Image (tube, helix red, strand yellow):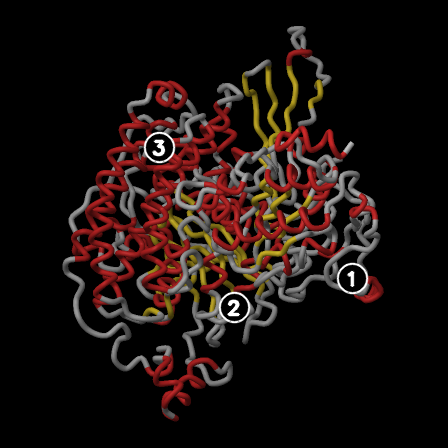
């Protein structure tokens, strides 16, 4: 990394101790591509200037070209450690724009998938941050569980990573009984793995000392800075869209919103750790009571994607397919705009949609939680040590693709 | 907070400003003139809307029956009552300037920089208004509708290294 | 001479210097994970518990380019990132190889937009392409094995095979005149081809 002495007029005569350090864009602790320009006094961080955009790939521009069902493939790649959560958020906003009410079965399956993704996301966040702080074991444990969730996703959707599973008003396909059984088994073994990781991390003296009291975020700053999700809840903002503005079928389940008052790195990890057990609680309630019935509601007309076996075997199915996918035959959408958000693992993931009547967005704005969390980073790191940068970055769980879009 | 309460409160405080209220899918929306943005947002801040969830812009160049070029959207949220309100305002070329709301909500800082980066709308009073996502040398505003999706060749403008050279 | 060799028995192995060097190089590839996006997570999966890349001698991920001989470009590379990638590539010592992992690194993938470089092989030499969005860990392991085979088959001790290639591998280059015309028509100056944000 290039190192340079900053020439400043400092009356205290300490100017030769102040130096700048370029951190990133290619650095193991940034996980992906972030860049920080740190101003340091010895090892103490005086200021940090984030420089982002190293993964800006024009997501929002593509949202104006692709239709509501096609864009789900792009949305997948936004927060790539929990792809299904993005899909659910995207189609939640499209359904809100079009005024579609989902069937109970579809809602339940989406809820289970969303909560699986929360476990998926928090596992990676905790595992990799511990890896950066010097412990490789928890990373291996976390990836064991992640591989199991990948298998569950693959079984339901056919893809292990970028599933592109949701459709407007429904899902690509229904789930099978074997899948339900698989999820049940996962929840059984998950508790043991969670306890293992929890004991390995949360009672680890080194980990506690490297995270407790580091990267403080006050409640007022969290609210003013637009922090949501685990970051805000660790600072005492008791907000969870699953409880405050229930969507999907979260109303039916009994779960707690995990909050903490302390607002440091350790609190953020602790909130994530406990949220995973809450997610497992929701899944175990939902998996036992998935309602029978269709995935698509009655009377959806050409919005619903037809079943592929019908498309290939009957003329009516083929016509239905063309009606659903030909640009000039697709369903019309109210000429309106709407903002809809869901509680993604990282925070409030919202979409501001503007429609001009076509079956594609005129403007598809993403409200990324990572952007606002990373904007708070300089505030949190001031006064900490250089080695704390890694811990704070890890606790914020900044995902570059979501940050830059 | 009920929608009626908010409407009455804002209308009572600004009798001279033309406010256009609308509702869609249970969301309250308020359209105002660009000149009144700062005072109305400050007032909403005192009403309890303590979080600026989202700030974005829309280029209405190809929108059917649009009268203005740009629409700037503020999504506000009250963390106490979980009420949301969407405030919209409109801008036209060449006068693409709005007052910055960074002093009301910290979260506006990067979102306003992003709007400047993508649409070229300037924010008066912003502490550090420069490009956020694109390189400083970039000349265009890519989220405008007249900018092609595939760009104008910027993505190809780099030196090439072969095996023999590197 | 022949008699002496016979006396030594099994304790001496005769081979070519090239073969020894290739054998050593192929089985201790140290990757430099240039992980920008989704493929980076699959790269982590490959190195983590279930797939365990260390079985193939390349689990020693080094995050400084000066200690590596294999660059894995995992994820899309955008305008702002390409100069960084090129600089890291130039910092790696010889002999070095490059794996372009995933559809975005190979061709731009689904991101045919203004900001994304349409394939890193336009600007860098690439040895192995891995298709998929993102490729499964098995596919990445296969590509490492393919690269090992390539090194064993064609490598030389002095690295002669690198000097022979004077044209960039990959697809034909874009039409530079077209870009110039496009920018002139829109009244825009040409970007400085030597532009590098890190300087």
Residue C42 rendering spot, x and y as whole percentages:
48, 49
Q: Which chain carries label 2?
A: A
- Kindly check if marks 1 and 3 are in contact, taking CB atoms under 8 A apart as contact: no
- Indicate left or right for A108 with A268 as reference: left
Residue A348 rendering spot, x and y as whole percentages:
38, 48
As drawn, the label of residue C173 is: 1
Residue A82 rendering spot, x and y as whole percentages:
40, 51
Q: Which chain carries label 1?
A: C
| Residue at 48% over, 55% down | C136
Is disc 3 surrounded by few (<14), some (14 to 19) or many (20+) residues within 10 Å? many
- Give B61 or A397, whichever is nearer the viewer: A397
- Indicate left or right for A386 with C149 as reference: left
In which quadrant of the rendered image does the C terminus of chain C lie? top right
| Residue at 69% over, 26% down | A2
As drawn, the label of residue B96 is: none
- Kindly check if marks 2 and 3 are in contact, taking CB atoms under 8 A apart as contact: no
Say whether mark 3 and mark 2 are on the same chain. yes
Mark 2 to mark 3 CA distance (whole Å)? 37 Å
Is disc 2 surrounded by few (<14), some (14 to 19) or many (20+) residues within 10 Å? many
As drawn, the label of residue A362 is: 2
Question: Residue beneath label 3, please?
Answer: A268
Residue C173 appearing in the image: yes
Residue B11 appearing in the image: no
């Amino acid at each position: 990394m290039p190192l340079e002495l900053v020439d400043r007029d400092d009356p205290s005569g300490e100017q030769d101790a102040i130096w700048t350090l370029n951190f990133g864009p290619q650095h193991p602790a940034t996980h992906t591509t972030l860049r920080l320009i740190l101003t340091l006094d010895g090892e103490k961080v005086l200021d940090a200037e984030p420089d982002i955009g190293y993964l800006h790939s024009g997501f929002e521009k593509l949202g104006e070209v692709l239709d509501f069902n096609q864009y789900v493939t792009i949305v997948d790649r936004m927060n790539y450690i929990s792809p299904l959560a993005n899909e659910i958020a995207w189609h939640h906003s499209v359904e809100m724009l079009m005024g579609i009410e989902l069937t109970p079965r579809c809602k339940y399956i989406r809820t289970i998938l969303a909560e699986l993704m929360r476990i998926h996301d928090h596992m990676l966040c905790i595992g990799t941050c511990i890896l950066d702080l010097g412990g490789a074991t928890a990373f291996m444990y976390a990836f064991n569980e992640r591989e199991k969730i990948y298998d569950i996703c693959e079984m339901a959707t056919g893809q292990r990573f970028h599933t592109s599973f949701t459709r407007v008003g429904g899902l690509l396909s229904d789930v099978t009984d074997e899948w339900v059984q698989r999820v049940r088994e996962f929840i059984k073994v998950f508790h043991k793995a969670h306890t293992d990781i929890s004991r390995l991390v949360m009672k680890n003296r080194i980990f506690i000392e490297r995270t407790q009291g580091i990267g403080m975020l006050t409640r007022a700053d969290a609210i003013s800075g637009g922090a949501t999700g685990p970051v805000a809840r660790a600072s005492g903002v008791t907000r969870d869209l699953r409880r405050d503005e229930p969507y999907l079928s979260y109303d039916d389940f009994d779960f707690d919103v995990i909050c903490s008052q302390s607002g440091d790195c350790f609190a953020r990890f602790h909130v994530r750790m406990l949220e995973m057990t809450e997610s497992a609680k929701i899944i175990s309630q939902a998996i036992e009571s998935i309602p029978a019935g269709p995935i698509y509601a009655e009377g959806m007309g050409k919005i619903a994607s037809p079943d592929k076996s019908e498309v290939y075997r009957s003329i009516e199915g083929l016509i239905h397919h063309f009606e659903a996918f030909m640009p000039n035959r697709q369903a019309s959408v109210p000429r309106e705009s709407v903002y809809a958000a869901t509680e993604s693992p990282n925070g409030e993931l919202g979409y501001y949609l503007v429609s001009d009547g076509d079956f594609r967005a005129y403007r598809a704005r993403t409200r990324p939680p990572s952007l606002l969390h990373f904007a708070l980073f300089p505030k949190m790191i001031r006064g900490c040590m250089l080695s704390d940068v890694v811990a704070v970055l890890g606790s914020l769980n900044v995902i570059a693709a979501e940050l830059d879009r | 907070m009920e929608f009626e309460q908010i409407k009455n409160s804002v209308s009572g405080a600004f009798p001279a400003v033309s406010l256009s209220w609308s509702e869609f899918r249970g969301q309250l929306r308020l359209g105002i003139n660009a000149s009144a943005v700062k005072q109305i947002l400050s007032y909403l801040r005192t009403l309890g809307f303590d979080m600026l969830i989202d700030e974005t812009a829309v280029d209405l160049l190809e929108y059917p029956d649009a009268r203005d070029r740009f629409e700037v959207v503020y999504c506000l949220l009250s963390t106490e009552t979980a009420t949301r309100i969407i405030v919209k305002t409109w801008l036209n070329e060449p006068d693409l300037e709005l007052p910055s709301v960074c002093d009301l909500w910290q979260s506006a800082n990067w979102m306003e920089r992003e709007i400047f980066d993508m649409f070229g709308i300037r924010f008066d009073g912003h502490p550090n208004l420069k490009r956020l996502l694109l390189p400083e040398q970039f000349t265009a505003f890519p989220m405008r509708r007249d900018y092609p999706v595939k760009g104008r060749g910027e993505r190809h403008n780099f030196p090439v290294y072969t095996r023999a050279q590197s | 001479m022949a008699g002496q060799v016979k006396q030594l028995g099994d304790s001496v192995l005769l081979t070519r210097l090239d073969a020894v060097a290739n054998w050593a190089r192929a089985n201790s590839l140290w990757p430099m994970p240039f992980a920008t996006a989704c493929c980076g997570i699959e790269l982590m999966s490959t190195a983590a518990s279930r797939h365990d890349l260390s079985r193939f001698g390349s689990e020693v991920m080094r995050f400084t380019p000066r200690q590596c001989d294999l660059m894995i470009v995992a994820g899309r590379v955008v305008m702002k990132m390409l100069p960084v990638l090129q600089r890291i590539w130039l910092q790696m010592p010889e002999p070095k190889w490059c794996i372009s992992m995933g559809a975005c690194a190979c061709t731009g993938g689904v991101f045919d937009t203004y900001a994304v470089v349409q394939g890193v092989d336009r600007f860098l030499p690439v040895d192995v392409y891995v298709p998929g969005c993102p490729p499964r860990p098995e596919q990445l392991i296969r590509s490492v094995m393919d690269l090992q085979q390539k090194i064993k088959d064609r490598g030389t001790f002095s690295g002669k095979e690198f000097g022979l290639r004077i044209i960039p591998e990959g697809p034909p280059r874009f039409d530079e005149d077209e870009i110039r015309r496009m920018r002139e028509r829109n009244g825009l100056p040409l970007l400085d081809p030597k532009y590098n944000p890190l300087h």
